[in-house]
Image: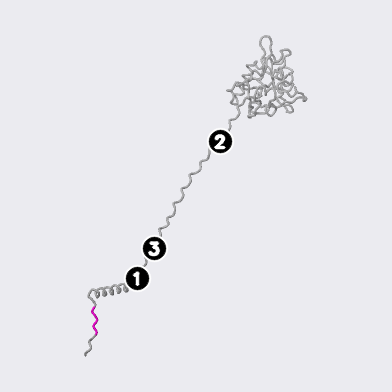
Amino acid sequence: MACRADRRPSASPLLTLFAVGAALTLAACQSAPPVAPASAPAPAPVVAPPPPTPAAPAVAAAPAAAPAAAPLGFFVTSRNPGQGGDLGGLEGADQFCRALATEVGAGHRDWRAYLSTSDTGRALAVNARDRIGNGPWYNARGVLIASTLEALHEQNAINKETALDERGQVVSGRGDPVNAHDILTGSSPAGRALQADPDATCANWTSSDAGSAVVGHHDRTGLDASEAARSWNASHRSRGCSLDALRGTGGSGLFYCFAAD
């Protein structure tokens, strides 16, 4: 018996076509260049921050206003009007105070001479303390002399360093080449009028010859340490009413001026 060759069943056309396609795909994959990995995104450029805006220049604060100087309200006259104890009465003495104050720019105030007059029968007495207002009073350097009328007659700041003239100059006193510490007042220590006899006011400030005047010591010094010697407004009587007589006891016919307003 003859042998037959072993026949395998042939593959179907569809399988053959699938096998060929797979082989082609594999060959294409093996021959294709490798895919480069995706590159990382480029970093964003660094942008420099804008330069800081220069600060506006500091504006200097306006200087604080200086405190107003205390207004001149008290001084010793730098000179006598020229007739010794004759000042032209109270009115003339007040006008002289105003004239001196005007010379230093303070003439707008109501200036009064610190002078009393006595009752002579023809006119009533006038107290110096009643003429000058109620204070406070400052000298030409702004130093407080007294804050009230009571303080002025009880414990004031009058002495050689503070009882200045209208220009702020020291008035000479005891121990200086020229002693001018006798200041005309015609008053008691309390600032009140005295009796007309003996004369204490150079005939109510109208005599440059006969009579006498009660004076005080602006430098608060005298021949001794008594209360009278240290009184600013009632130390002793002058030898007379002429300029020479007033100089004879240590004066120059000066007097105090106060602003009454």
The residue positioned farthest toward the front in the image shown: 1
Q: Amino acid at mark 3?
A: Ala
Closer to the camera, 96 or 142? 142
The residue positioned farthest toward the top in the image shown: 121
Q: Of label 3 and label 1, which has the lower sequence position? A: 1
Q: Amino acid at mark 1?
A: Pro
Judge whether 166 appears above or below 6 on screen: above
SS class of the residue under badge 3? loop
**Gap in angstroms between the C-alphas marked 3 and 1:** 18 Å
Judge whether 248 appears above or below 41 on screen: above
The residue beneath circle 3 is 40
- Pointers 2 and 1 in contact (C-beta within 8 Å): no
Q: Position of residue 65 (x, y in %)?
A: 56, 34
Q: Amino acid at mark 2?
A: Ala
The residue beneath circle 2 is 64
Q: Please say whether residue 9 is one of the residues in the magenta stretch.
A: yes
The residue positioned farthest toward the bottom in the image shown: 1
Q: Viewer-nearest of labels 3 and 2?
A: 3
Q: Left or right: where does residue 43 sit relative to residue 224?
A: left
**Gap in angstroms between the C-alphas marked 2 and 1:** 85 Å
Q: Residue at x 61, y 24 (%)?
A: 101
Q: Badge 1, how many Cα within 10 Å: few under 14, some, many 20+?
A: few
Q: Position of residue 105 (x, y in %)?
A: 58, 26
Q: Position of residue 239 (x, y in %)?
A: 74, 18
The residue beneath circle 1 is 34
Q: Badge 2, how many Cα within 10 Å: few under 14, some, many 20+?
A: few
Q: Of label 3 and label 2, which has the lower sequence position? A: 3
What is the magenta range? 6-10
